Image (spheres, coloured by chain):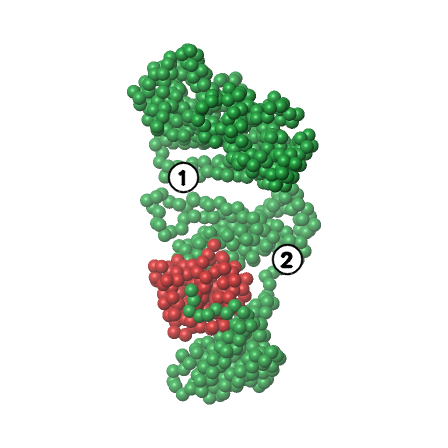
Chain colours: A green, B red
Amino acid sequence: MSTEEFTDDMDAIRQIFFDECDEQLALLEEELTTLGEELENGEKINTIFRCVHSIKGGAAAFGMEELVKFSHLFESVLDLFRSGTHSVTNDSVSTFLKCKDALFDIVAAFKNGGGDCEVAPDTISELESYLHSETSEPEQAPEDAEMDDIFGMAFAPVKIAIDAPIEQNFSITLTVTPEFYERGDDVRNILIALEGLGQLQVKVDTDRVPLIGDIFPEQSYLTWKLLLVTQKSQVDIEEIFEWSGDDLQATITLASENVDDAPAPLPVAVEEKTDPQVRKSVDRKDSATVRVDIQRIDKLVDLIGELVINQGAIQSQMRRNKVHGDSVLGNVVTAQEQLIHELQENVITMRAYPIKTVFQKLGRVVRETARLTEKQVRLVLEGEDTEVDRSILEKLSDPLTHMVRNAIDHGIESPQVRAQAGKDPEGLLRLRAFQRSGRIIVEIQDDGAGLDPDRIYEKAIEKKIIERGQRLDRDEIYSLIFEPGFSTVAEVTDVSGRGVGMDVVKQSLQQINGRIFISSAKGKGTTFSISLPFTLSVIEGIIFKAEGQDFVIPVNNVLETIIFDSRKAFHIGEGKYGYPYRDGYLSVIYASDIIGASSDGLNQKICFVIENENEEKLAFIVDKIIDHSRFVVKNLEDNYRKIACFSTATILGDGNVAFILDVEFLFGELLKKRESSLEERV
Amino acid sequence: MNILVVDDSRTMRDLVSRELRNGGYEVETAEDGIDALGKIKGFSPAVIITDLNMPRMNGLELTQALRAQAETKFVPIIFLTTESGDELRRAAREAGATGWIVKPFDGPKLLAAVRRVSS
């Protein structure tokens, strides 16, 4: 992609520099000898200046101090000629020629390895005389600063005399002009640069955004409110903004981190007043954890739940009064909704625990099981820091314990068998937790014998779970192990045969809205993947109406929503209906049946295609869909009493209580109906 | 990511290119503003680093020309120069420069500046 051949070697670039110096010096000489013969010297002076400038730039890059110093001095003098402060005379030309010779000597000295080359003192004094005769301009100051900078001795910004780096909280408010963007910059760049200094929190203030009709697309209406926790000084922060000049307005204030410490934001000077030791101990306290009674956090979660409900009430009231979402009020309410959402997520994470607490317990289970089954097992834990809501973690421990025991007992082979199969006698059991698309995935992976589909199939026939000849694909065969009464081992072992089968594992996972998947390869091992929600206290759901009442169905169970055409539903037995769907048929459950109202179902126009954890589907028929939203889950048993098909409820925006449909119950009901209709036929 | 380096000094071009290529960037070079304008097409740089003082067309004129073209209107332009005067900086800013680095050439500083405008 290049027109020039690049040189990677520093020595080669150094050589190029010397070649270039020779070129520049030759050009310098040529220009100098013709200088003064023409009235218009401007362009010549410019070229001369550029030659010297170019040499200085390269010399600085290679740390050739003498060359930089001298060319800088020469350049400063040339600048006075360039700006017209001095005009070219024969004397000045002769000085320049001397300077050119001096440059040549210094370059030659560096070229030959040695750097100690003295410039004749009279040449320097001649040059300096031009600078001194130039009276008025105090322009030296920035130039000196630059010189300092060249050798890294730059005048440092006011250093604060504190030994240990101290974290400070800066609150920064940013606004930019359209010109800021026109210069190819982006606030994002600034934020990323700031993030490099410490921990950054960003809030965008949309107060200045006008109504849509008044928005001028090139104008910048946003205000960024940042909180930066950093060990760097204010000067380091200002450096990031420096480039942007007037196009970026930033106010930086040092926020006090302790209420007793300073009541108001004070400038950096406050540092010196505080004893560093005290400050440090405060910091340590800040970074430490606080033990809070879990009930207090639960209370907070509840209160935020109320806030969500209230927010819903405001929004439904706004809709009723036809307040436009783009109005000022609409924007404020939307912003508030976002804030509450964030608040909720944050508080819920406060209640989260690392899965480590469960994993560590499993370490003991693994050792014990391995000892009892005389197997060698190495346990590998991954993602132990993955956080899970406490309510889920509590219910995860038992199923995981059982699955780990199973994996060692049934999965991993004995050391002899493994050795014969050419495997490491020591089996590997990997427990892994991670987040994927908003859910927590826990994997239990062994490198054992793997599931044997033929054996499972035979066993299932033996246990009368399936009938011979039933066609099942591999995944369906695998999932047979979750059927009640299934066990692939003939004798009950000490370890896993405790009357608890995989069916119980599956059930307990379903209670916490978990799903389980199996992948296995014969001879290579088995992986059980459990997918869990992050929390049980908030769900995403659809509000629907049935028999004049509002209900909520969790959105993750709804596969599809279709218009229900009652003429297509066909009778398959007493009160039982089928409905065509895709290439097959679905069993139909009318919401009115569940609720117990005796409607003819004529109002019911919407069909939810519902799927459960076993990928069974059914058609659930309701009157209409009201809204789609996030709901705070309230336990009915705690607040009211247990109702069969609704174990939980939520409070809607209008203050009404809506029951949350228990999808597994629907399938249970359906199963009962199926069985009873079979009995009828028999 | 493509970066165009504009400098009349071959030493500087090589030094800067070397640093950028070590930083993982694709580099094209130009000897002055006019050369740079000719090399924009087909290379589409994500960042342009230019010297201020150059024959034929200097950095300021180059910046103005780039800002006037649709395809380079918003491309970040960093000046890499020994000049540090406030007036020149202001002129560069007005012409549309994004950032300004004062030579001597300092590799990490340069890479930081490129990251600062291109992240």
Write the residue at 67% across / 48% down. Answer: A280
* Amino acid on which the number 1 mark rests in the picture: Asn
- Tell me, yes or no, whether the two marked residues, 2 and 1, touch with CB atoms within 8 Å: no
Write the residue at 49% across / 87% down. Answer: A94
Q: Position of residue A488 (x, y in %)?
A: 57, 26
Q: Position of residue A205 (x, y in %)?
A: 45, 45
Tell me the number on the disc at residue A160.
2
Write the residue at 45% across / 18% down. Answer: A671
Tell me the number on the disc at residue A331.
1
Would you place residue A420 above or below residue A574 in this image?
below
Would you place residue A195 above or below residue A619 in this image?
below
Which image quarter: residue A374?
A: top right
Label 2 to label 1: alpha-carbon separation = 44 Å
User: Helix, strand, or loop for circle 1?
Assistant: helix
Locate the N terminus of chain A by quadrant.
Answer: bottom left
Mark with earlier residue (2, 1):
2
Chain to which the residue tagged by mark 1 belongs: A
